[in-house]
Structures are given as structure tokens and as C-alpha cells.
Image: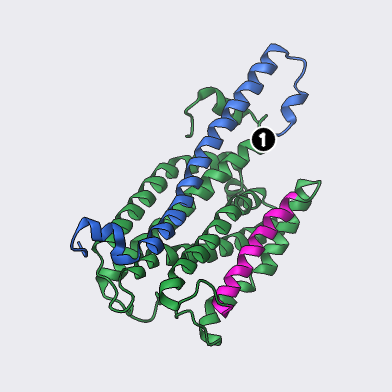
């Protein structure tokens, strides 16, 4: 390790207020994109499954299915 | 030739194939970034002038590289969409734009935090910083333009054209530190020259850059897949996917 103690590491030898927010924002945005894409996929597939069930109940009305999932 | 292009442009084929790569891309990208962060934050030696503030380089440089690579990828997709009318290319360009905007903002934000202790200011109107800020606005413009049209095809074409106009900014960003006398330093990595840092400093940076590229690929593919489902919820294979639950995930 490049630091003498764990306290020095957290303090970044005085540069903590610059280093940690930079890492938090950049890596945080990566995590946010990853999570959001997985959550959205689940939501979209659930929506498609609901469309399928609705049409199975009313076979005559399929026009609604041509609308896009928002 | 044409059958291959049609197969590559087929959303169903893309969805199935990319589902196999995706877990590998997520996993290896996350692994490289975790390893690079721990190495860069705790084990790389401090800079002899900047001390530990230089560690911001491990997020600043990858974010800046990805901001520009993402734009280049969107430009290639825009050409493919405008010339061959392959919709998948448009979906990929649309999926990548928010990520590129986020990386541009990340580079500007981490750069501002780095500027305070090293330059004594968080912002200067120097060529590198200004051209990056311009790219952020171009990203936001592309995203806004896409949604501003009543027809999706109109929005897609307008976004593609604005992307191709915005490409002119890429060489300006790259050579801004050469053409103008900037406060910003020159390139960290170069293909032709040895890095001006010891391996213990640039190796973790290399891991970060590779990890960012892998995550960019994973995020863009995942968002393109979502767009495919959003556009064709009635396709038989999409219905089967929703029924089967874990199919192709």
C-alpha cells in the first residue's frame, strides 16, 4: 500500500475532498447505467407478458398490441 | 454479401447472439474496474508533484476516452443507418447517447475537482475544456432532437445528421492540446511513445480504460436490447421471450 495508515488512505493525505467525489460520480454513473438497463428489461418483459395475457382473454382485440411499450 | 448484412441487422438475431456475450461483458468489465480502482487508489505510488490528488486520473482519463469513443461509435452507426437504412444501427446509436453524455459530464466533473488543487481553479476557458463542454451540449442536442419529432424515423434521421455534424468536434478535442497553448496537459497514452509514467502508475490506468470499454459495450448492448423489445412488443419471438422468463437473458 502507498499509504502509511488506513486513516491516511481515507484522508488521501489531504486530497480526500477531491479524490473521493470524483470516483463516486464517475463510478456511480457506471453502476446507475448498469442497474437501470437491467431494471428496464425486467419491466419491458413484464409489460409484454401482460399484453399477451390480455389478448389471450380477448382474442378479437389485438390492435392494442401494436402499440409500443413506453 | 446481402444475406449476411440482413442477418446482422436482424433484431432477433442480435438479441439472441448478444445475450450470450452480455454476462461476460458485465463480469469482465466490473472485475477490471474494481481491480484498477483498488490498485490506483491504494497501491500506485503518489505523484512527486501532485501527491495523492493525481489518483483522479484513474477515473478522469477513462471517462474522457469513453466520451469520445462513444461519439465515434454513434457516428459509425449513423452512417450505417443513413446509407443502408438498418434500424438496428439507429437503435444502437440512440442507446449509446445517454451513456456518452454521462461520460462527458464525468470527465468534466472529475477534471474540475482535479483542477482545484493542481491549477488553482476548477474551470478555465482553454481549448480542451471548452471543446469537451461543447461535446456535452452536442450529446444533449442529439438526445433532445431525437425526441422532438412526431415520427420516429424523422427523429432518427435528424439525430444521425446532427451526430455526423458533431464529429468535427472529435479531432478538435484530440488536437486541442497540440494546436493551442492550453493549461490542460498532453495525451496520457500514445501508441508511438512510451508512457511518461512508471508501469505501477499506468498499468492500473490501462485496466480502468479496458474495463470502461467493456462496460460501455455491455450498457449499449443491454439498452439496444431494451429498445428492440420496446419497438416490437407484438413480435412472436418477443412474446415467447416474455413467456419463457429467462430466455435470452
Render colour scheme: by chain
Outermost residue toward the top?
Answer: A57
Taking depth in this image into account, of A38 and B111 the one nearest to the observer is: B111
Q: Quadrant of residue B1?
A: bottom right
Taking depth in this image into account, of B80 and B243 the one nearest to the observer is: B243
* Image coords of residue A49 (percent x, y): 60, 23
* Image coords of residue B34 (percent x, y): 33, 52
* Residue A58 in view: yes
Where does label 1 land, which residue?
A: B232
Question: Which segment is the magenta one?
Answer: B125-147
* Image coords of residue B225 (percent x, y): 56, 41
Display colour for chain A: blue
Q: Quadrant of residue B144?
A: bottom right
Taking depth in this image into account, of B20 and B50 the one nearest to the observer is: B50
Residue at left offset 65%, top offset 64%: B137
Residue at left offset 61%, top offset 67%: B135
Residue at left offset 66%, top offset 31%: B233
Amino acid at each position: 500500500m502507498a499509504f502509511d495508515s488506513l486513516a491516511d488512505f481515507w484522508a488521501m493525505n489531504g486530497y480526500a475532498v477531491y479524490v473521493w467525489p470524483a470516483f463516486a460520480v464517475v463510478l456511480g454513473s457506471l453502476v446507475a447505467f448498469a442497474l437501470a438497463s437491467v431494471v428496464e428489461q425486467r419491466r419491458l418483459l413484464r409489460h409484454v407478458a401482460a399484453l399477451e395475457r390480455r389478448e389471450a382473454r380477448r382474442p378479437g382485440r389485438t390492435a392494442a398490441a401494436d402499440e409500443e411499450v413506453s | 454479401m446481402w444475406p449476411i448484412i440482413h442477418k446482422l441487422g436482424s433484431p432477433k438475431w442480435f438479441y439472441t447472439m448478444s445475450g450470450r456475450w452480455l454476462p461476460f461483458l458485465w463480469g469482465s468489465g466490473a472485475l477490471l474496474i474494481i481491480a484498477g480502482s483498488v490498485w490506483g487508489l491504494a497501491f500506485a505510488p503518489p505523484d512527486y508533484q501532485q501527491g495523492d490528488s493525481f489518483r483522479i486520473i484513474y477515473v478522469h482519463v477513462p471517462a474522457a476516452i469513453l466520451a469520445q469513443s462513444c461519439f465515434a461509435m454513434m457516428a459509425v452507426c449513423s452512417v450505417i443507418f443513413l446509407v443502408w437504412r438498418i434500424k438496428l444501427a439507429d437503435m444502437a446509436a440512440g442507446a449509446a447517447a445517454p451513456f456518452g453524455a454521462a461520460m462527458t459530464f464525468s470527465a468534466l466533473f472529475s477534471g474540475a475537482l482535479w483542477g482545484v488543487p493542481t491549477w488553482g481553479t476548477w474551470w478555465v476557458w482553454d481549448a480542451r475544456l471548452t471543446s469537451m463542454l461543447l461535446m456535452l451540449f452536442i450529446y444533449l442536442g442529439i438526445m433532445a432532437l431525437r425526441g422532438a419529432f412526431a415520427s420516429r424515423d424523422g427523429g432518427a434521421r435528424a439525430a444521425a445528421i446532427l451526430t455526423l455534424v458533431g464529429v468535427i468536434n472529435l479531432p478538435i478535442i484530440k488536437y486541442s492540446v497540440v494546436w493551442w497553448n492550453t493549461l490542460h496537459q498532453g495525451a496520457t497514452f500514445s501508441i508511438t511513445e512510451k508512457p511518461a509514467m512508471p508501469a505501477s502508475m499506468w498499468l492500473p490506468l490501462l485496466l480502468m480504460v479496458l474495463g470502461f470499454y467493456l462496460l460501455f459495450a455491455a450498457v449499449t448492448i443491454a439498452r439496444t436490447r431494451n429498445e428492440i423489445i420496446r419497438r416490437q412488443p407484438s413480435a412472436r419471438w418477443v412474446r415467447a421471450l416474455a413467456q419463457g422468463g429467462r430466455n435470452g437473458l
